[in-house]
Image (cartoon, grey):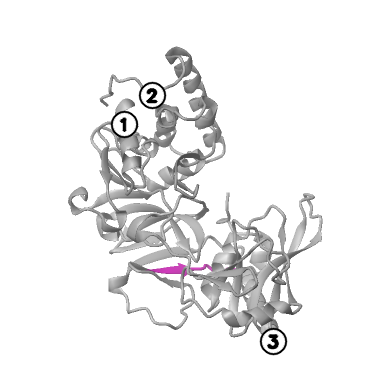
């Protein structure tokens, strides 16, 4: 392919920098291959070819090739608004996209580096379009893509919620790779039939990188889900937490999907000692249980996520970590929430924990029993199964969303998301242990 003769933006002597960068780039590619994140020669070649450091000249060379994100832009409040994603996640998503030479690919959420990787995959007969709402981000991407010889990548400044018609090729894109957290998937019409869409989709605030194939106008996942985190979508597609605060408690409840419920009446419930309902289901200290929380989000009406101010006087013990609000349900003036209780050291010394449910309020014990029963149901029927399958149908092709809870269906603006959970009989679930779709 044609390369620009302009030298990449570097801050160290060219010869030393290029030698060191090449060694670090190959070292990173080796690491990703050994961990199973790269599985095809084409993705491995792209990672060994594109100079990641040239897209992040602000950081030291070793940091540019660390297996971690590189923040590149911050908002006024210090929040990261643009970054170069962690290489392991980029590799996973590139593999999931199944891109071939000659493909036409759209990237939503720009920066330059990932677009260059995509261009290596499509080759000189393909086309890559990278789009971002922030002109500072697209200006940066344009500059670095030109400096590194990838000026054939088309860079577009636009709100992805309203994809400009002129950027969509006849028949649609062969692949769309979304590199920002998205609450919805408004790009089905822009994707070719049989094409791939890879996106970090938010379901009740839980983030999953999901690979979809378009089949008969809808999207269907067909491989394991990956827990991940990206910068937030901006513009008209930005998600809203629907945050509600229980007065005087420092307890906050979030409804990103579903109808927000009143919370003012919950304050008295948090002044009482909670009931504790044991589930009998355990988890290792280093064992993720993301599949359980996704299951509960779809199974339980009134599901929400709970966050606690660290200095609040709220009566909520064992608060969830701030970066991962806990699972909860509201039942009138009562509340139940999922918690864990350490019951031993575990075989690895990292601890063994039992899932318990705390009930707050006069009917909290009933809400806790309801949630505990769903935890047991997940364990007996789904814990040892393959990953859930996610389907996204255009909202226009579905019946209007009602106010009644439909299990494992998330009604969004453009789509209806359905989560299907394969079933494994209880004895098999106990033998197989946790599912394969847990976080890496």
Q: Position of residue 67 (x, y in %)?
A: 54, 36
Element type at mark 2: loop
Give the residue at x 25% y 33%.
Answer: 152
The residue pinned by badge 3 equals 362
Residue 417 lies in the magenta-colored region: yes
Front in this rendered view, residue 47 or 320: 320
**Magenta region: which residues?**
416-424
Element type at mark 1: helix
Is 191 situated above or below 123? below
Are the residues flagged by discs 3 and 2 in contact, CB closer than 8 Å? no
Front in this rendered view, residue 30 or 429: 30
Give the residue at x 31% y 61%.
Answer: 186
Q: What label does residue 143 carry, if any?
A: 1
Residue 88 lies in the magenta-colored region: no
The residue pinned by badge 2 equals 9
Q: Position of residue 439 (x, y in %)?
A: 57, 53
Q: CA distance from mark 1 to mark 2?
A: 9 Å
Q: Earlier in the sequence, mark 3 or mark 2?
A: 2
Q: Position of residue 395 (x, y in %)?
A: 32, 71
Q: CA distance from mark 3 to mark 2?
A: 64 Å
**Label total for image:** 3
């Amino acid at each position: 392919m044609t390369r620009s003769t302009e030298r990449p933006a570097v801050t160290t002597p060219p010869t030393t920098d290029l030698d060191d960068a090449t060694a670090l780039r190959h070292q990173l590619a080796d690491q990703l291959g050994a961990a199973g994140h790269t599985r095809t020669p084409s993705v491995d070649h792209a990672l060994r070819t594109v100079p990641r450091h040239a897209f992040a000249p602000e950081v030291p060379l070793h940091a540019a090739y660390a297996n971690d994100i590189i923040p590149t832009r911050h908002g006024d409040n210090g929040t990261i608004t643009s970054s170069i994603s962690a290489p392991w996640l980029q590799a996973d998503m590139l593999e999931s996209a199944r891109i071939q030479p000659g493909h036409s690919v759209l990237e939503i959420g720009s920066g330059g580096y990932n677009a260059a990787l995509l261009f290596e995959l499509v080759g000189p007969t393909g086309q890559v379009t990278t789009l971002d709402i922030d002109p500072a981000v697209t200006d940066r991407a344009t500059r670095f893509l030109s400096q590194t010889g990838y000026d054939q990548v088309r860079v577009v400044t636009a709100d992805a919620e309203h994809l400009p018609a002129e950027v969509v090729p006849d028949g649609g894109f062969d692949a769309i790779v979304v590199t920002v957290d998205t609450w919805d998937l408004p790009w089905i019409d822009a994707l070719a039939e049989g094409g791939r869409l890879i996106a970090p989709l938010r379901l009740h605030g839980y983030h999953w990188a999901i690979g979809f194939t378009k089949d008969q106008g809808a999207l269907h996942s067909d491989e394991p889900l990956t827990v991940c985190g990206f910068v937030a979508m901006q513009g008209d597609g930005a998600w809203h937490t629907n945050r509600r605060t229980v007065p005087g408690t420092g307890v906050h409840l979030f409804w990103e999907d579903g109808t927000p419920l009143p919370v003012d009446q919950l304050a008295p419930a948090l002044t009482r000692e909670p009931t504790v309902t044991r589930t009998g289901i355990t988890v290792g200290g280093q064992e993720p249980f993301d599949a359980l929380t996704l299951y509960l989000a779809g199974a339980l009406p009134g599901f929400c996520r709970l966050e606690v101010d660290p200095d609040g006087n709220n009566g909520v013990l064992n608060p969830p970590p701030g970066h991962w609000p806990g699972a909860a349900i509201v039942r009138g003036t009562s509340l139940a929430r999922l918690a864990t209780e350490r019951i031993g050291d575990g075989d690895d010394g990292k601890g063994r924990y039992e899932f318990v449910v705390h009930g707050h309020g006069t009917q909290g014990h009933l809400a806790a029993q309801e949630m505990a029963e769903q935890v047991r149901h997940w364990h007996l029927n789904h814990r040892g199964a393959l990953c859930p399958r996610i389907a996204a149908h255009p909202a226009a092709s579905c019946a209007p969303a009602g106010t009644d809870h439909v299990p494992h269906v998330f009604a969004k603006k453009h789509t209806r998301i359905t989560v299907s959970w394969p079933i494994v009989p209880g004895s098999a679930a106990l033998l197989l242990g946790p599912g394969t779709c847990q976080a890496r």
